Image (cartoon, helix red, strand yellow):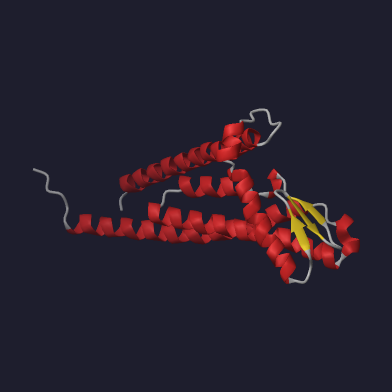
Amino acid sequence: MDEIQIRTAKKQADRKAIRFVVALFILYIIFSQGNIFMNSVMSPGGKYYNAFFAEHFDYIQGLKTALIKPAVWIIKLFGFYAIHNEMDVMVVNGPYLRINYSCLGLGVMSFLAAFVLAFPASWKSTIKMLVIGLISIYLLNIGRIAGLGLLFGFFQSQRNYFEYHHEIFNVLVYIVIFIMLYIWIRKNTRTISTEAKQNDEKINENPPIIS
């Protein structure tokens, strides 16, 4: 590869990097702020509350329910008796847990979706990573809720010393997601490099005829 080709490849790589950063920023703002806006739309008393959307399109409450029910099932599996409603879990002789918007993991889900959709990869690989990543965050969140119920159930004296479980959960999830993204990026980068090398070899074997 001569100097002109190297410069051209570098410029193309720089453009791709800029497009990725811009797309990541825009998509993250859309997803994260969109979820916050929809939470206001779905919440009675919210600034933008809409009864029709709250009744028919409340995916936020759907996610709460999808987290609470498996977590309660796990807590009961360990011998505790737990009851729940649409946003609360109460473990008898254990803690009382309220599942707020901040407990749903929508922020980290927004980051994951924005990153995966912005990264230059095939749609098949993108959708696969998006599904695996979102399911992983969901399962980790169930584990966190169930874990808090069990931890405070077994060690009741420690309830007042675990105020930062949101922060700990976010750090843990981001570590897991970054590891997954690192492996995914390496795999896709290797695939792109292999395809580019094969294309160069084809061009060298069959150079264009200039007349």
Residue 209 placement, left or right of 45 = left
Q: Give the percent coordinates (x, y) of residue 66.
A: 62, 54
What residue is at 31 percent from the left and 53 percent from the top? 1
Residue 156 makes an appearance in the image: yes
Q: Give the percent coordinates (x, y) of residue 177.
A: 59, 57
Q: Residue furthest top?
A: 47
Q: Give the percent coordinates (x, y) of residue 100.
A: 72, 46
Q: Give the percent coordinates (x, y) of residue 195.
A: 32, 58
What residue is at 52 percent from the left and 39 percent from the top? 27
What residue is at 77 percent from the left and 71 percent from the top? 79
Q: Residue furthest right?
A: 157
129 up-or-down from 47: above or below: below
Front residue (pair 29, 183): 29
> In the rendered image, which quarter contains the C terminus?
top left
Residue 197 placement, left or right of 125 = left
Please tell me in which quadrant of the rendered image residue 70 appears: bottom right
Residue 123 placement, left or right of 25 = left
Residue 109 placement, left or right of 201 = right
Numbered marks: total? 0
What residue is at 69 percent from the left and 52 percent from the top? 170
Residue 143 makes an appearance in the image: no
Front residue (pair 181, 192): 181
